[in-house]
Amino acid sequence: MSDQSKLIWFNGEIVPWEEAQIHIMSHVLHYGSGVFEGIKCYSTQNGPAIFRLDDHIKRLFESGEKYGIIIPYTVSELTKACLDIVKLNGFENCYIRPIAFYGYDTLGVHPKDCPVEVAVASFFWGAYLGEDGLVNGVNITVSPWKRLSLESFPSSTKASGQYLNSMLAVQDARKRGYDEALLLNQDGFVAEGSGQNIFIVKDNKVITNGENASILMGITRETIIQLCHDLEIDIQIM
Ligand SMILES: Cc1ncc(COP(=O)(O)O)c(C=O)c1O
């Protein structure tokens, strides 16, 4: 197993990785009824630093609310869970994956009384498209799969089931020899990659799209926009 570490924060307790288990009849497994975050922790001279942790936790709660997944912990409890799990696993540089999901109660699509379970894992995850990609770039292809319509899903939530769309796109891209897929939206305009927002640089201008393009409103995207403003780089949001 590649993405593994020693400990996981699971429903308020720290448990060994192997013991963080759920029932096979959990609602999330059948219907993708979970919301999650992907957070990077970087090694710095002052020790490990988590990138915009508060904003990620805020988005987790917002994603949950959209799907009626009411997280039974406070923002500060989950923030602390992220800090604790990085420290307890002894990481300097890692990825943090908080997830909240419907557990087992009913198998009806309406989750009724399914409990909301919460976990926070951390493990090492290098550059998303490989270290080589950071230096030499990656090959991407326009996907035959369109990004989920704004009328079908709240596109700005990071929800488990929504990632079937991304999975189809990236599987197709890899099968055809590319590194990553570029999904267009229902109107045929650029939406995003299977796991990242898209920026282009043209004529000394940085260009990206906005929420109406059917994208996840990425926290990295927001930071890049802010940096462009701070550095007085021309940026256009279409
Ligand atoms: C589909 C998709 N879009 C955009 C992003 C970028 O989001 P963020 O910058 O908040 O990590 C991600 C990140 O995982 C993603 O999966």
Image (spheres, grey):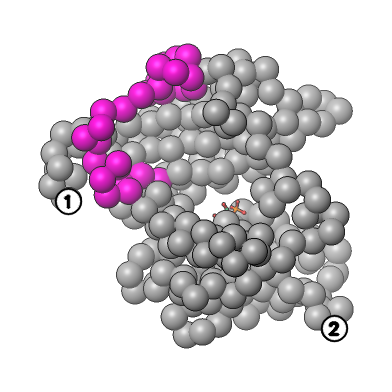
Image location (x, y in percent) of residue 92: 73, 26
Within-10-Å neighbours for mark 1: few <14, some 14–19, many 20+ = few
Q: Residue at x 33, y 39 (%)?
A: 101
The label shown at residue 109 is 1
Residue 68 showing in the rendered view:
no
Q: How many angstroms separate mark 1 from mark 2 (CA)?
A: 50 Å
Mark 2 falls on what kind of element?
loop
Is residue 43 rendered magenta in the image?
A: no
Q: Is 115 placed left or right of 234 in the picture?
A: left
Q: Is 131 placed left or right of 19 in the picture?
A: right
Q: Residue at x 48, y 29 (%)?
A: 120
Residue 168 showing in the rendered view:
yes
178 lies above or below 208? above
Magenta stretch in the rendered image: 8-35
Residue at which label 2 appears? 203
Q: Which quadrant of the structure image shows residue 143? A: bottom right
Q: Residue at x 41, y 51 (%)?
A: 159
Mark 1 falls on what kind of element?
loop
Q: Which quadrant of the structure image shows residue 40? A: top right
Image location (x, y in percent) of residue 222: 65, 59
57 lies above or below 150? above
